Amino acid sequence: MCVTLDRSLDKPLLQTGSTDVRVIEIQKLLAHWNLYAGAVDGIFGEQLEQAVKVFQRRVFLPETGTVDALTWRSLYAGAPIEMPVLQRGSTDQSVILLQKALQASGQTVALNGIFDHQTEVAVQQFQRRQGLVVDGVVAACTWLTLSKISR
């Protein structure tokens, strides 16, 4: 099942040095996603920052270590959110993220930022292996499945 999440989630910006009950919330969420095994103490330290970065990488967010609104929503979803639908002809930074994820999954694809024939075939092969609809289009379900690949 693919995830959609209410955009109205109202949470504070948190980063290294923050201390708050919301930090405990982050620690628990990251522990739930098996990315944090440190103390659940409400202190945003180095270990938590690293866990946030790993989570951000997993869900295709910039690895800042800061928990902003998009990171909060992704933490609750446990998945990438607000990712663009990509298909043949797409060209931008999101295509490079896609190509890197495809490479991590074992697909052979050039890192050129262009959703070309080679990228489309790699997406279709990935979708087929994962039991997804094989349409060569990268939408929510394909992004979610790609986020589960170690990178």
Image (cartoon, grey):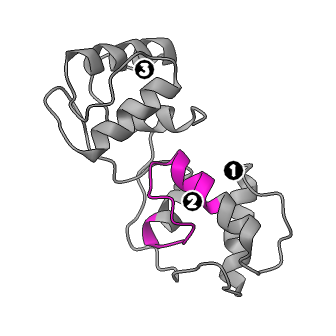
Q: CA distance from mark 2 to mark 1?
A: 9 Å
Crowd band around label 3 with a 10 angstrom C-alpha radius: few (<14), some (14–19), many (20+): some
Crowd band around label 2 with a 10 angstrom C-alpha radius: few (<14), some (14–19), many (20+): many
Left-right relation of 14 to 109:
right
Say which of 48 and 42 sits in front. 48
Residue lying at the far right in this picture: please name it: 39
Dot 2 or dot 3, earlier in sequence: 2
Q: Are marks 2 and 1 in contact (CB under 8 Å)?
A: yes
Q: Which residue is mark 1?
A: 33
Q: Are marks 3 and 1 in contact (CB under 8 Å)?
A: no
Q: Which residue is mark 3?
A: 132
Q: Position of residue 121 (x, y in %)?
A: 30, 13
In the rendered image, which quarter contains the C terminus?
A: top right
Q: Which residue is mark 2?
A: 75
Left-right relation of 58 to 121:
right
Dot 2 or dot 1, earlier in sequence: 1
Tell me the magenta residue range.
52-70
Q: Is residue 64 magenta?
A: yes
Say which of 60 and 135 sits in front. 60
